Image (spheres, rainbow, N blue to C red):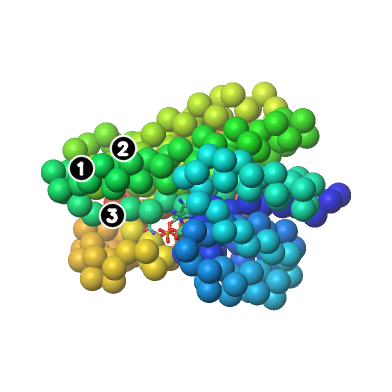
Amino acid sequence: MSQRVALITGGAKGIGRGIALDLASRQWNIAFCYRTSEAEAKTTAQDIIRQGGQALALRCDVSDPVAATHMVTQVEKEWGRIDVLINGAGPYHRRNLFDETIEGWNEMFNSNLHPIFYLAQAVAPAMKARKAGRIISFSMANADQMVAQPEVTAHYIAKAGVLILTRTLAKLLAPYGITVNAISPGFIDSGSTAPQELAAMTKRIPAGYIGAVDDTVAAVRYLLSDGARYVNGANIQISGGWGI
Ligand SMILES: NC(=O)c1ccc[n+]([C@@H]2O[C@H](COP(=O)([O-])OP(=O)(O)OC[C@H]3O[C@@H](n4cnc5c(N)ncnc54)[C@H](OP(=O)(O)O)[C@@H]3O)[C@@H](O)[C@H]2O)c1
């Protein structure tokens, strides 16, 4: 069997990097993209190789549909296949709706939701032809509640959209043996949230502590396992009971 290949967006840092290193330790080939974090991407590529995988670090802004589609072509050309797409990139900013800018509003949709559509459309043909493939995207723990979110409005609406897009893709791709699932973290110490914000949140988390990157990696490992072949359109909350 050819080497298994994963494409991970936002894989230079945080949760994406954790997934990359875990798959590399099981000898996967890992292509990942970053937008600005070039130094972190170099380190992650070296660490992937150290773990036993092969690495392809690509600068790609996945909010650009042409660049996102081109990246899929690049990986398929390099390694002949993409077995798994992990949509890790998902920036957020905390800004009251009435202080939000048009650019900030659009950025939340352009980087959190739209790339999942562009990339799924690009990887699906080869996955369908092989009758195999897995796609995992990241939402957020309370996105399925559809509640008011004055401080993270666009991000929250985009993450709710991720769940609908996940279920839609699952329904369309299940006949081809492909699964499409979502993971919804609560508060994970991945480096993207300020330590003060994490500390302030701890008392509101029923489990009483902030999650680790490894908590999300474990869920990815499960969704990529043979045991999860019939799990499709699911949303796994990794939040210690927060946001449910
Ligand atoms: N950490 C949490 O507590 C938490 C909670 C809820 C949901 N999530 C979701 O879980 C996922 C992973 O979280 P994380 O904290 O590990 O992520 P993160 O650190 O916020 O993002 C990982 C990387 O995504 C890249 N990225 C952002 N926009 C991009 C774009 N348009 N094109 C290419 N790369 C882009 C960034 O790359 P550059 O640095 O190169 O710009 C960043 O390093 C995200 O979808 C996030 O929304 C996380």
Distance in Å between CA atoms under marks 2 and 3: 13 Å
Residue 131: numbered disc: none
The residue sitting at the left extreme is 98
Identity of the amino acid at label 2?
Ile
Q: Residues within 10 Å of mark 2 (few under 14, many from 20)?
A: many
The residue pinned by badge 1 equals 149
Which is more toward the observer, 128 or 80? 80
Disc 2 beta carbon < 8 A from ligand 1?
no
Q: Residues within 10 Å of mark 1 (few under 14, many from 20)?
A: some
Q: Residue at x 73, y 66 (%)?
A: 53
Query: Disc 2 on helix, strand or loop?
Result: helix
Residue 93: numbered disc: 3
Q: Quadrant of ligand 1?
A: bottom left
Q: Picture coordinates of residue 199 (x, y %)?
A: 24, 69
Q: Quadrant of residue 31?
A: bottom right
Identity of the amino acid at label 1?
Gln
Distance in Å between CA atoms under marks 3 and 1: 12 Å
Q: Would you place residue 146 above or below residue 18 in this image?
A: above
**Lower sequence index among marks 3 and 1:** 3
Q: Are marks 2 and 1 in contact (CB under 8 Å)?
A: yes
Query: Disc 3 on helix, strand or loop?
Result: loop
The residue pinned by badge 2 equals 157
**Lower sequence index among marks 2 and 3:** 3
Q: Are marks 3 and 1 in contact (CB under 8 Å)?
A: no
Q: Would you place residue 156 above or below residue 207 in this image?
A: above
Query: Disc 1 on helix, strand or loop?
Result: loop
Q: Is residue 142 visible?
A: no
